[in-house]
């Protein structure tokens, strides 16, 4: 009763909740279509296209993309495409972990230098570094590709991760905002005890900055997990493909005139599960950290 009195049911609230419900429906409806298609039998896909719920849901498509169904059975149910899902999942996990760990570490070092260390031209360099955010990423693809090709790193893991392992302007700016808020007294006390700048950074600043570091790691994970174009142009070999590239190749396989939509949706649903869990568990922390840094 007290909550109802504090939040009276006004016309404005009804309109706001209605709009919110509509936006949630618009956002989640494509995901529901993915799930519905994934649990529909391949031979019944077009017959059930107008239904909101599948009449006879099945896990057959998940078993097909995970390689748990024989080739004969796969062809018998209309499966025409092939995907090495577990290998692509392994490559995506390694690709994402390598970039997230290295980029978070190097970005933290650069952000701490811009926030605390004194050296000539620091503010000018930081301004130029931030100006790099205005350069479209597509502009860098050609020089990066030429460099990776000259190094002989095409179709290699190091070729895929090389452009991403160091810091990004957004990550440096994001962490610098937090490091500026760290009390200087802590660092000055450690400095009087003879601690070096790296010791202060590693043993004092990083342990009390877990929240922004985790937030940056989550944001980097989402971007890296969904990265498509660079892995696609650098690694054509089947054993080097990440999930985004493998799904694109899977979609392009049309030996019978149309893609294997049910298998493609099953693989897509499995591919988004890790990021979905990450957002559900830690999404609130990301929003609070972005609000604290002023990046609303």
Image: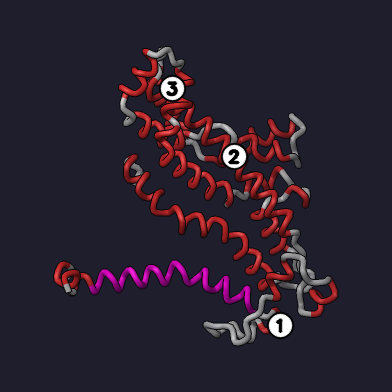
* Residue 38 among magenta residues: yes
Vertical side of 140 occupied by 240: above or below? below
Vertical side of 144 occupied by 255: above or below? below
Where residue 7 appears, x then y in whole percent?
18, 68
Residue at 69% over, 73% down: 61
- The secondary structure type at the circle numbered 2 is helix
Where residue 279 appears, x then y in whole percent?
47, 56
Q: Which residue position is annotated with label 3? A: 200
Looking at the rendered image, the disc whose residue lies closer to the viewer, 2 or 1, is 2
The tag on residue 99 is: 2
User: What is the residue that sits farthest to the front in this orientation?
Assistant: 193
Residue at 75% over, 73% down: 257
Vertical side of 42 occupied by 243: above or below? above
Of labels 2 and 1, earlier in sequence is: 1
User: What is the residue that sits farthest to the right in this orientation?
Assistant: 72
- The secondary structure type at the circle numbered 1 is helix
Q: Residues within 10 Å of mark 1 (few under 14, many from 20)?
A: few
Where residue 268 appears, x then y in whole percent?
62, 63
Q: How many marks?
A: 3
- The secondary structure type at the circle numbered 3 is helix
The tag on residue 100 is: none
Labels 3 & 1 near each other (Cβ < 8 A): no
Q: Which residue position is annotated with label 1? A: 43
Where residue 180 appears, x then y in whole percent?
34, 29
User: What is the residue that sits farthest to the left in this orientation?
Assistant: 5
Question: Range of the magenta residues?
Answer: 14-40
Q: Which of the two residues, 26 or 68, is positioned nearer the viewer here?
A: 68
Q: Quadrant of the N terminus?
A: bottom left
Q: Which of the two residues, 172 or 235, is positioned nearer the viewer here?
A: 172
Disc 2 to disc 1, C-alpha distance: 41 Å
Of labels 3 and 2, earlier in sequence is: 2
**Residue 23 occupies quadrant:** bottom left
């Amino acid at each position: 009763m007290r909550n109802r009195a504090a939040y009276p049911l006004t016309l404005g609230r009804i309109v706001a909740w209605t709009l919110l419900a509509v936006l949630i429906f618009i956002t989640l409806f494509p995901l529901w279509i993915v799930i519905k298609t994934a649990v529909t039998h391949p031979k019944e896909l077009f017959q059930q296209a107008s239904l909101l719920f599948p009449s006879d849901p099945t896990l057959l498509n998940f078993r097909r993309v995970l390689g748990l169904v024989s080739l004969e059975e796969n062809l018998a149910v209309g499966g025409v495409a092939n995907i090495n899902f577990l290998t692509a999942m392994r490559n995506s996990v390694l690709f994402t972990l390598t970039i997230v760990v290295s980029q978070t570490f190097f970005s933290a070092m650069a952000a701490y230098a811009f926030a605390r260390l004194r050296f000539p031209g620091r503010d000018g360099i930081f301004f130029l570094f931030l100006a790099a955010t205005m350069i479209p990423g597509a502009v860098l693809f050609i020089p990066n590709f030429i460099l990776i090709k000259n190094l002989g790193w095409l179709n290699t893991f190091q070729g895929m991760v090389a452009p991403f392992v160091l810091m990004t302007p957004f990550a440096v700016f994001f962490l610098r905002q937090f490091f500026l808020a760290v009390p200087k007294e802590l660092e000055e006390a450690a400095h009087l005890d003879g601690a070096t700048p790296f010791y202060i950074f590693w043993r004092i600043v990083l342990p009390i900055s877990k929240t922004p570091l985790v937030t940056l790691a989550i944001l980097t994970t989402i971007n890296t997990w969904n990265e498509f174009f660079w892995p696609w142009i650098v690694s054509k070999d089947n054993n080097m493909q990440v999930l985004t590239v493998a799904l694109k190749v899977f979609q392009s396989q049309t030996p019978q005139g149309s893609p294997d939509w049910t298998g493609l949706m099953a693989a897509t649903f499995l591919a988004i599960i890790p990021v979905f869990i990450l957002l559900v568990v830690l999404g609130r922390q990301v929003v609070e950290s972005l609000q604290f840094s002023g990046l609303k």
